[in-house]
Every structure is written in C-alpha cells, then in structure tokens.
Image (cartoon, rainbow, N blue to C red):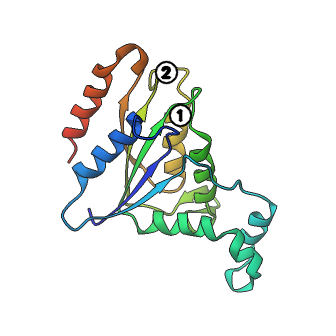
Amino acid sequence: MNHILHIDASGRGKPSVSRALSNEIVQKISGKKTRVTYRDVSQGLPFVDEQMINAYYTQKAERSEEQHQAVALSDSIVEELIAADAIVIGLPIYNFSMPAGFKTWSDLAARVGETFKYTEKGPIGLLNGKKAYVAVTSGGTKVGSEIDFLTPWLRHFLSFIGINNVEIIQAEAINRAGDKAIEEARMSIALLQ
C-alpha cells in the first residue's frame, strides 16, 4: 500500500471507538513507505450550494476566481481520493445513519467527470482499483439490520464513485455488547491482509 486516505467522522475525540479502530486498520495495512493523508470531517464542511454547483459545470479554465475558491475544498477532496490506493474510514452510526460531516464529505467527493461520469447505461465510477476499509461502530444499531441505513448507503455510494472492494469491520451495539464487540472488531482487523 503506497498511499492511504484516512477519514474520521466521529464527533468524539480520544474516546471514539471508530477513530481507534480506523487507526488500527491504517497501522495494519501500512508498509514502511506508506504515505497517509488524514481528513477529519467531524467538525463540519461547507454544504454544496448554488455557487459550487455553477462552478462544477463551468470549465476550469473559464471559472472566475470566486468559483475556484468555491470548489477548492471539493477539489482537494477529489485529489485525495484519486491519489489514494486505499481509503480507511472511521464511521459511527448516528441515529441509524451517518454523521452529517461525512454526508457532506460525500457530496463534495461526488464530482461528475472526476469521480464518476454519466453514460448511456447510467453513471459509472472512475475510482476503480481502490479498496475501502470501514470501521463502523454503533451504540445500539446492529450492522446489516433493517434499521441500519448507513452501510447499504455507504456501499452504494462507494460503488457509485468506482470503489467496489469494500471491507466493513463492525463494532456494533456497543451499549449492549460492550468490550466484546470492540474485541471482535480488533480480531477482524488482525486478519486483514
């Protein structure tokens, strides 16, 4: 693994289980020369607005300075995704889905002509050949259950931008299972190649 993009979304700091597990995944899959780019989306990102959308649909060479500034963060997010061989995400389930910061990150990452394109057969992802490792944690929601709206959405979104190789490591229903759920996730991380 030459380059890892590591993203954390938990609003918690050091006590965050998803942050601890995503860090363990990065350590497990890193080599001596692996470069890691880190992005914490928990403090919020700007929402996509009209100015951004107008800039997206204006050729780069024709954008005003204001339009370049409007999409600068989105451009950085896209560049990080393109440069990475693997993406590691620490993602808690908040109220049956994802933290708002991660959803905003996904809106900034989905860029027509850069991370996906439209064809006669529908959209096609452009970030092929990458693997995503996702540490999903929850206090009460069981991953894969009828009330888990995060993991199906996440798999669909990553596939939409071309990342079809997705490994989810879960520490679920921690409020009931406690340390046992975390230890099971750590055992899964230990088995990663």
Q: Residue at x 37, y 31 (%)?
A: 170
- Could you say which disc has been placed on residue 181 in the image? none
Compared with 149, 47 (above or below) is below
Q: Specify the farthest residue to the bottom.
A: 61
Q: Position of residue 84 (x, y in %)?
A: 39, 64
Q: Residues within 10 Å of mark 2 (few under 14, many from 20)?
A: many
User: Which residue is labeled 1 in the image?
Assistant: 150
Image spot of residue 60 (x, y percent):
68, 81
Query: Quick check: 39 left or right of 105?
Result: left
Image quarter in which the N terminus is found? bottom left
Q: Residue at x 57, y 38 (%)?
A: 99
Which amino acid, mark 2? Thr
In this rendering, does residue 91 appear at all? yes
Residue at label 2? 141
Asked whether 74 or 168 is in front, the reply is: 74
Q: Earlier in the sequence, mark 1 or mark 2?
A: 2
Q: Secondary structure at mark 1?
A: helix
Q: Position of residue 53 (x, y in %)?
A: 76, 64
The location of residue 46, given as percent across then percent down, is: 68, 56
Q: Are marks 1 and 2 in contact (CB under 8 Å)?
A: yes
Q: CA distance from mark 1 to mark 2?
A: 10 Å
